[in-house]
Amino acid sequence: MKSMKKKSVMLTFLMVFALSAILAACGGNNGNNTANSGNSGNSGTTNSTEQNSGGDGGEASGNELSGKVTFLTNRTDMIGKEYDEYVKRFNEKYPNIKIEFEASQTDYNQQAKVRMASGELPDLMFIPDIPNSDLPKYFAPLDDLQLSSGLTFKDFKSYDGKLYGITTGNSTSGIVYNKKAFADAGITEIPKTWDEFLAACEKLKQNGVIPLSSNFKDKWPLGSWVYDLPRVIENNKDFPNEIINTETPFTMDNGYGKAMSLIKELADKGYLEKDINSTNWEQSKKDIANGKMAMYFLGNWVINQVIGVGAESDNIGFFPLPFDNSGDSRAAFNPDFFYAVNKDSKNLEATKAFLTWMLEDSGYEDFAGFISPLEGRESKLSQLAEFQATGVELQEGMPDDPKVIEIRNKAQIDLPAIAQEFVLAKDPQAVLDKWNKAWAKAKQELGY
Amino acid sequence: MFGTMSYKTQKKLIIFTFLLIPVGLLLLFTYYPAAKLVFYSFTDWDGYSPEKPWVGLNNYKEVFSNPDIFGVFTHNFAYFVMGLIQNAVAIYFAVILNSKLRGRNGFRLLLFLPYIMNGVAVAFMFGYVFDTTQGSLNLFLQSIGLTKLGETSWLGTPGLVNYSLASTGLWRFMGYNMVIYIASLQAIPRDIYEAAKIDGANAWQTFWRITLPNMKPVIQLNLFLTVTGALEVFDLPFVLTKGGPAGASQTYVQRVVDTAFAYSDYGLASAMSIVLLFFVAAVVGLQQFVLSRGGSGK
């Protein structure tokens, strides 16, 4: 009898344990649900009160702003280093705002989208690739930021006349090169036409240097060839969007065909890596730094990375790629990630204060190797100054037309992948025909 | 309170409570997402927006009407071939390492170790092995005088790339298959071998007539793992080639992932996953049918 009792106590304990675990799980769920529905239902009122109190504080004195701001960042390398220093400087101005950094996983875009789907956004984040019409669903308008000068790419992430995203920094693409490798090969002047460029490549090759590091295998490093160069060649900043009017966006005599033919020519003449299907990105940075490879055609962000693996800053130069023999000099001007502020943020004003500070005073653009998001600010990087001194015309990009993105996604068109196919193909025209067909089919199915 | 219950009720109750948590977890983390996947396959969801427009069977029609989508299965063939070789090698090592060999545990450990390593790390490591100009494989081939062979672009030649990638899989999973085979070998009663020895059977006859037939269920299991593994390859080409050169090493799962995450077409990607599920079931069913016919006389 006694043992029986013991057993039943044991059993009761187990039952209670099991049931409580389940109940806890249910409770947790319910709690979440109510919290969520509360948020969506009352977000207007809670927000306005928050804003009011924040606004009042702000009017009295900016230093009174308080609260915690979470910032989901892709620069995981800066957490605990540069960001700590930023927070220290920021807190001198706003001592009561606490900044918390969240490190993103490797795929920022994907992670941000998942969090958007679950409705759990940080206060400050970057905008993943969503159509601009979705911006008001998630983000707060930023037209009221007090900045010392105008913003670049103001229309890029705007909707209905309201500004939702501010570029974190801008970049341009061009030839990043090792000056010593050029000098050793007997190249005294930077090439200004495509023929001069080919001649320079030949000299480098004769000197035992790989002229241009394409990182062909990794696909993404081909981005400048297909996203920047076509519109620059066409001298039409809206070229990537205007293809919506045609059934054959990829032809040999338009920007896409011409740009891809340029890299194909380099590949066919042996001016790229010995085996373009076997390239190594990390190694290529070291090889550019030590002069085994001479050039990259990439965004200016790569300059700091090459310096980071040991190149002397004085030894790295930057010039626009001469894409034809006309002597025209143009380069694409592109924004990087865009900052955006969560519209349901509990500390909206504090978040905006931090964003303003990041844009004005952080010096992030120089650290990251960007051109400032604020109009008319000169870069502290010598390479960018050098680039601009060539008299190059910087062509501002246009926001992508969501319809073009929709067609591209539907047709599974990945421009760098098409460039890969084009370069490897014996018959490049067939590659263009194939993707034109896919484009036309998707365009027709979507009814554009 | 339990004292009054009958033994049977108590038993039922305790079984029920013990099962509640694992079954709950299983439902929550396996069957609920699977049901969601089926649901998404009938929608046109882009991956983040709250609306999930219902499109019926359109995604399935797309999967079956686009020859490109099924075309990538030809790339998986290389993994299947390598998988068969892998099983043969695994049986070979299992038989050797099951005999009285000095240091056999050490050898077993060495062969099994690659399986424990992280798949992405393995892929990354083999990136250095297969590199055309600096890779250890080509440097080795050149140092033994095979200069022509030592210039092969292992990951850059369309016909070769899948076999290069699959050989990495062989290196990694052979030890795993071997351990399963060793376990099954140890389950074969010794007296059968003794009887065969007395009857004068040689080593080959023992292997062919006793060892292999006794291992048949396990061979079936390993072939099942090989076939599903070959159909579901993802990490190797994803890390090493990104499907290149020009899509020559793209696998079906990689295409699914691209469809969902690069082209924001979660509906189509879900439908492709469901189709793969049925495809694997069909292939495994076919394999069971073929293999079990031979053994039905037993």
Image: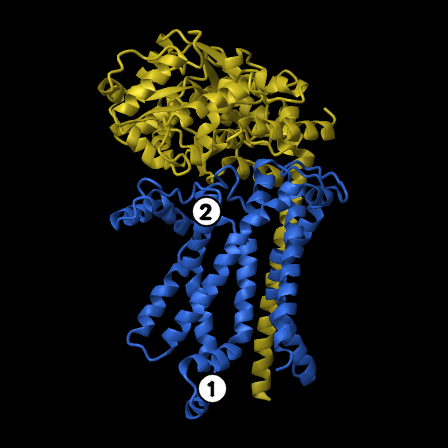
Q: Amino acid at mark 1?
A: Pro
A306, A353: nearer the viewer: A306
Q: In the image, which lettered chain appears yellow? A: A
Report the residue marked by disc 2.
Answer: B160
Q: Chain of mark 1?
A: B
The mark found on residue B189 in the picture is 1
Please state if B132 lies on the left or on the right of A103 as rendered.
left
Circle 2 packing at 10 Å, graded few (<14), some (14-19), many (20+), is some
Residue A143 % position (x, y): 57, 17
Please state if B23 lies on the left or on the right of B175 as rendered.
right
Location of residue B52 with respect to B283 vertically, above or below: above
Q: Chain of mark 2?
A: B
Where on the picture, by quarter, is residue B49? top right
Chain B's colour is blue
A202, B40: nearer the viewer: A202
Query: Can residue A326 be seen in the rendering of this structure?
Result: yes
